[in-house]
């Protein structure tokens, strides 16, 4: 893989699998590749694919079989005034838009869009794939009319995540529909 360095690669690797491994720090890359190959061989495979790399990352970084790995994307601007407590509380208590998840579901990512027009979403969601993310929730702040302005790029952001094969759910800690049309944000 790297010029001038001996590698112990026994199997054929698809080009996208090799590219994905370049994100692994160089000092552990060879060992990581050997582990990916070992997992692929156990499946009876003759070559390593991007799916093998993603499955290996998920296994190493804690994707439990049958568990749902969840991430939340939120507005960059709102993140300056909101520490994310509502989203995290709703997930931890499995309420609001997280009520369908069982106790084995894990929050594996909590990130901002990177600013308009959602410039970091695709890259960050793509990185989360290797950690086995199953679903990304668009935070309620991106979808509501008040107290913040609804994200003008929400549909493009949603499509970019779905384009990676990741399910997207609208909302986190508010049933968005009741707030999306100017109803009061907080009960008084």
Image: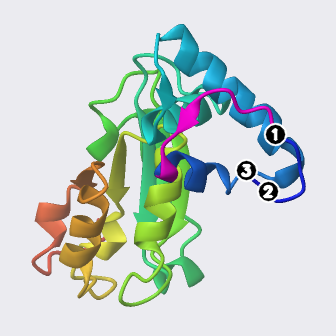
1 and 2 marks in contact (CB < 8 Å): yes
- Which of 110/149 is in front? 110
* Spot occupied by residue 150 in the image (x, y as percentages of width and height): 25, 83
- Can residue 45 be found in the magenta stretch? no
Residue 89 location (% of width, % of height):
50, 47
Question: Residue 16: x percent and y percent?
Answer: 48, 52
Which residue is at a point 45% across and 75% down the rendered structure image?
113
Asked if residue 186 shows in the view, the reply is no
Picture residue at 36% right of the left edge, 52% below the top: 136
Residue under numbered circle 2: 2
In the rendered view of the protein, which quadrant contains the C terminus?
bottom left
What is the C-alpha distance between the residues marked 2 and 3? 13 Å
Seen in the picture, residue 112 relative to 12 is either above or below; the reply is below
Residues shaded magenta: 7-15
Q: Which residue is mark 3?
A: 24
Mark 3 element type: loop
Q: Which badge, 3 or 1, comes first in the chain's sequence?
A: 1
Mark 2 secondary-structure assignment: loop
- Identify the image quadrant of residue 173: bottom left
Cα distance in 3D space between marks 1 and 2: 8 Å
Q: Which residue is mark 1?
A: 7
The residue lying at 80 percent from left, 53 percent from top is 25
Decide if residue 32 is on the left or right side of residue 163: right
Q: Are marks 3 and 1 in contact (CB under 8 Å)?
A: no
């Amino acid at each position: 893989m790297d010029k001038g360095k001996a590698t112990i690669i026994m199997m054929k690797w698809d080009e996208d699998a090799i590219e994905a491994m370049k994100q692994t720090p160089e000092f552990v890359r060879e060992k990581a590749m050997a582990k990916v190959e070992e997992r692929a061989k156990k499946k009876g495979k003759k070559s390593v694919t991007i799916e093998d790399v993603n499955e290996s990352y998920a296994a190493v970084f804690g994707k439990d079989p049958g568990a749902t790995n969840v991430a939340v994307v939120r507005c960059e601007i709102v993140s300056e005034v909101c520490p994310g407590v509502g989203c995290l509380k709703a997930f931890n208590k499995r309420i609001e838009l997280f009520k369908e998840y069982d106790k084995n579901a894990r929050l594996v990512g909590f990130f901002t869009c990177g600013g308009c027009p959602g410039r970091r979403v695709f890259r960050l969601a793509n990185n989360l794939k290797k950690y086995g993310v199953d679903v990304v929730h668009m935070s309620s702040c991106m979808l509501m009319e008040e107290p913040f302005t609804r994200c003008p790029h929400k549909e493009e952001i949603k499509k970019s995540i779905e384009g990676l094969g990741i399910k997207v759910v609208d909302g986190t800690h508010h049933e968005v529909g009741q707030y999306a049309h100017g109803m009061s944000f907080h009960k008084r």
